[in-house]
Amino acid sequence: MIPRALLSLLTAFLAVLIFALPAPVAAQQAAVTDPALRLRVGDVLTIALPGEGAFNKDFLVDRSGRVSLPEVGDVDLAGRTLPEATTLLRDALGKAFRDLGRLTVALKERRLLVTVLGYVATPGEVNLPGDAGIQQAITAAGGLNQGAQLDKLQLRRGNRTTVFDYKKYLDTGDARIVPQLQPLDVIFVPSSPATGNVQINFDARTLADQGDAADSTSSVKVFGEVTRAGTFGYKEGLSVVDMIMRAGGVTRYASIEQIRVINGGEPIVFNLRRYLDTGDDKLLPPLRPGATIFVPKQEEEIRRSVRTVYVMGEVNRPGAIESPPDARLIEILANAGGPTRYADSRQIRVLKADGETQRFDLVSYTEGDRAPLPAIMPGDAIFVPEKIEASDRPSWLKIPPSRAVQVIGEVNKPGRYEWSDEMSLMDLLGEAGGPNQRADIAHLQILQSEKDTATPRNFDLQAFLSAGGPLSQLPKIRAGNVIRMPSLPESPIDNKAKWVQMAKEDVIYIMGQVQIPGRYAFNKNMSFLDILTAANGPTSTADLRNVRISHRGLPGSKVTQLNLGQYFATGDEKLLPKVRTGDVIFVPDRTNKDWFDDSKESTVRVLGAVAKPGRYRFSNDMTLLDLLAEAGGPTNDAYQQKIVVVNLGCCREQARIFDLIQFAKTGDIRLLPVVQQGDTVYVPTTSQSGWKIFVDGIQNVLPIISLIAYLSGG
C-alpha cells in the first residue's frame, strides 16, 4: 500500500505537470487518460506483459478497427472503452499465455488515418496527429497543385459529402468554415474549370491570365482588346469597370466608346470614355452572373467623316486618318508611320473618291524630282504596295544599301547580307558559310566606300587565326562594304593560262636549274626552302654554291649569293637568306657556263700537266690538294717535284715550289703552300727538268763522239 501522504504528493505533481504542458498537448493527454474514451481507427495502444518481449512495442488500431496480437491474431477494439478493450485483450491472450495478472493496456496516442485525393501533389492516405485539421492533411499530401479549385473542396464521410470553401478559410482564418476531421475521412480537391480538359504544363501566371472563375454558369467572360482576356468569378457588387480591371485593363487599340455588355441575352453599349469624363454611375450597365463583356478594336469600326483619308498597304500604321483639308500626301504618310522596309515606294497609288487612280513615285520625289504632289481629298485612299518577290527567295531590294554588305569570292554562300554595326567580320563570314577549300584567307580584301570613293584594304585572316590577338585587330566593317575572298592560285605548270590571275605583289620567281621553274604564290609565312621545294628542288647540274637571289622592291639593287651546298653540309639556318614577294631566285648550271661568269678575284688558274687545266672557283678554306683534285690531278708526264704556286699579294708577287712527291712520302701538312683566290698554279712536265735536259743533251752528243772515234780509228 502507498502511504496516503505520498499518494497526495504524486497527485499534486501530476496536476502541476499537466497544467505546465501546452494546451493541445494537455488536452490530448487528458483525452488519452479518460477511461470513458472509446477507441477508434488510428489509435496507438501500449500493451505490456512482463516476461514477453513480443509486447515491447506499439499496437495500431488499423482501418478495420482491429489490433493484431502475437500468438492470438486480430482483436476488434474499435468503439470500445479502454477497460472494455483490456477485458477483450485479457480473454484473447488467455488462450496462449498463462500469467496475465500483470497485463496492462494503455492508450498511448490518438492518430487520424485520412485519405487526400484530387489536385494535390501526392494523393493517398496520410497518418496525422489526433487533433489535425484540413490544412495539415493537405500539407501531408504534398500541398495543392496549381489549378486546384479552392472554394469547392469536398469532405466525404461514409455516404455523406460536405462541400466547403477552403479559399474563404485561407482569407479569413475562421476555423468554423472547415469541418473537423475524423478517422477514415476522404478529402477531395477538385481542379478549376480554367485548366480545361487537356493535361498541359502551366504555371500560376498562365492560369491567372485565363481568369479565376470557378463556376462557368455564373462566371463573367471578358475578351477583346483587354490585357488578359478570360473568365472571372462573379461577385455581388462588382461593376463592368471592376471586371475590366480584373482582366488587366484595356489595350491602346481598344475602342472604349463601343464596349458591349450582354446580360441574359440583352446587349448594352457602354461608353467608358464618357463615364470616365463625367463619373456618372448611372452610365454603368448592370452586371449579372454569366454576363459577357466585349471590348472591340478601333480599326474594326468603319470610320467615316467629312475629313477621313484611308492609308493602306506597306505603311507602319495603316488605317483611317482624320486629315485637315490642306494636308499633303507626305504629311499623311508620315502620320501613318511612313512606308515600311518592304514598301515599293515607286509605285504608290492614290485612289480618288470618284474612281480615278493616280500614281506617285516617292523615291524620285525624295531625289529631287519636283513633280507636283497628288492632291488628297476626304474619302481618298492611299495604297503603298509591297515589293515584288521571287518565288524562291525574298526580294533583295528589301535590304537597303545602307544596311547591306556584299560578300563575294570563295565563300560557301556568297551574297548580299543585312548588316548591323554590333557585328564583326567573323559574324559576317560565319553567316556566309565560311571560306571554302579554294579560299586564300591570307589575302582577304575589303573594299570600303566613303563619299563616292572606294578604298581597298587587305587583311591576313590566316595569320590572325594562327596567332590570335585582340578582336580590335579585325577590320571594322560598315554597311556598303564589299568583302572579297580571293581564291588560291592554281599551279602554273598545270594551267599556264591561270598565272596571269596572280598579282605580282603576291608571287616570287624562281629560275635556272630547278625542276619546275616559274612564278609561284608566296606569303610572309613561307621561307626560301618552301619556294625551292615548291619548284621540286634543284636539278642534278645545279651549281648549289653560287645561287643568287635578287631582292626587288628595295631602294637600290641588292643581290644575295647563297652557298646552298654549304647549308646542306652544315644545316646552319643562318646561311639561308630572307626572301619576300617579288624576289627572283636564280640557280645556275655548273656544267654549261661561260668562263667569264666568274671574276678573276674569285678563281684560281691551274696550268700545265693536269688532266683538266682551267679556271676554278676557290674558297679560302680549301687547299692546293683540293684544287689539284678538282683539276683531275697531275698527268703522267707531270714534273711533280717542281709544282709552282704564284701568289698575288697586296704588295708584290711571289712564287713557291711544292714537291708533291716529297709531301706524299712524309704527309707533312706544313709543306703545303698557301693558295688564295686569284693565285696561279703551274705543274711543269718532266721535259722541263734539269736532268731531262742533261740526258737529252748527252743523247745528242753520244752519236757525234761515236762518229769521231770511228773516224779516228779508221
Image (cartoon, helix red, strand yellow):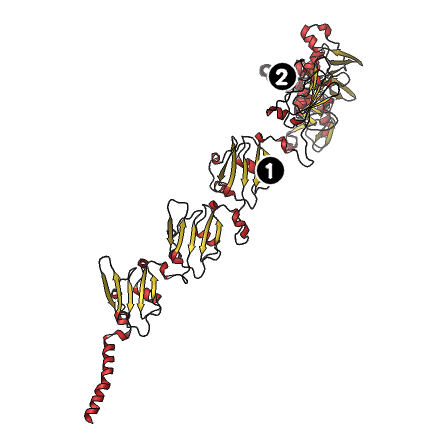
Residue 138 image offset from top left, x and y in percent: 68, 23
| Left or right of 99, for residue 8 | left
What residue sits 58% from the left and 37% below the top?
Answer: 431
Q: In this view, does 315 lie to the left or right of 602?
A: right
Q: Is residue 703 above or below residue 10?
A: below
Quadrant including the N terminus? top right
- Quarter that holds the C terminus: bottom left
Q: Does the magenta stretch include residue 692?
A: no
Is residue 523 among what the camera can see?
A: yes
Residue 240 vs residue 400: left or right?
right
Q: Quadrant of residue 680?
A: bottom left
- Rounded to the nearest angstrom, the CA distance separating label 2 from label 1 is 86 Å
The residue shown at (31%, 62%) is 604
Looking at the rendered image, the disc whose residue lies closer to the viewer, 2 or 1, is 1
Mark 2, residue position: 26
Q: Which of marks 2 and 1 is nearer the N terminus?
A: 2
